[in-house]
Amino acid sequence: MFVIVGCSNPPRMSKEYDFIRNKLEVLNICKNILEDLDYEIDIYAPESFILTTKSTRLRRVLRRYDYIIYIEVNDRIEIHISAERSIFNRGSESSLGGKGIIIKQVETYMPLSLQKKIFNPIHKKLLENTFKQI
């Protein structure tokens, strides 16, 4: 008997990398990588080894995604994406003033193609700096 298991959702929006350097040095390298990729750093906390980017807008067809990248350096580098999707509300309750026309919805999963668009440039830069994906 064969059982086929499929995943209806794309994978979680996180990646992990291994390193052999000082945690502060690794955090600085990650910060430089994000800045090289034109991300604006919002929170940089070397005392807790985390950083986040400012919200970045990604457009796809009728849906618009706003996302931030969160990096935490512990015994490994953890990179997470937090996203919300803007949806045009076509309901009859839309006001004439334009309020309530767009609904923001938190996304646990982004389409895989969009995740790759975000992660691939970061992944390439991390590999150039000798980090290994776990």
Image: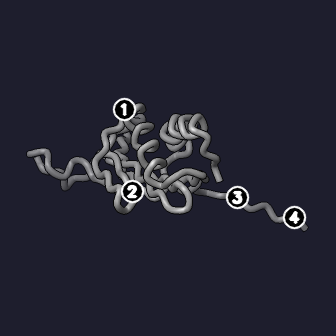
Please state if 91 lies on the left or on the right of 29 as rendered. Answer: left
Measured Cα–Cα span from mark 4 to mark 1 = 48 Å
Q: Earlier in the sequence, mark 3 or mark 1?
A: 3
- Badge 4 vs badge 3, beta-carbon distance below 8 Å: no
* Res. 38 mark: 1
* Label ID, residue 50: 2
Q: Are marks 2 and 3 in contact (CB under 8 Å)?
A: no
Residue extending farthest front:
22
- Which of label 1 and label 2 is nearer to you? 2
x, y (%) of residue 57?
A: 33, 39
Q: Nearer the viewer, mark 3 or mark 1?
A: 1
Judge whether 49 appears above or below 42 on screen. Answer: below
| Relative to 25, residue 127 above or below | above
Mark 2 secondary-structure assignment: strand
Q: Position of residue 11 (x, y in %)?
A: 58, 54
- Upstream in the sequence, badge 2 or badge 3? 3
Q: Which mark is residue 2?
A: 4
- Distance from disc 1 to disc 2, alpha carbons, whole Å, reads 18 Å
Which numbered disc covers residue 128?
none
Q: Label 3 amino acid?
A: Gly
Q: Residue furthest right?
A: 1
Amino acid type, residue under disc 2 in the picture: Ile
Task: Compare residues 7 and 128 and report the one nearer the observer.
Answer: 128
Which sits earlier in the primary sequence, circle 1 or circle 2? 1
Say which amino acid is labelled 4.
Phe
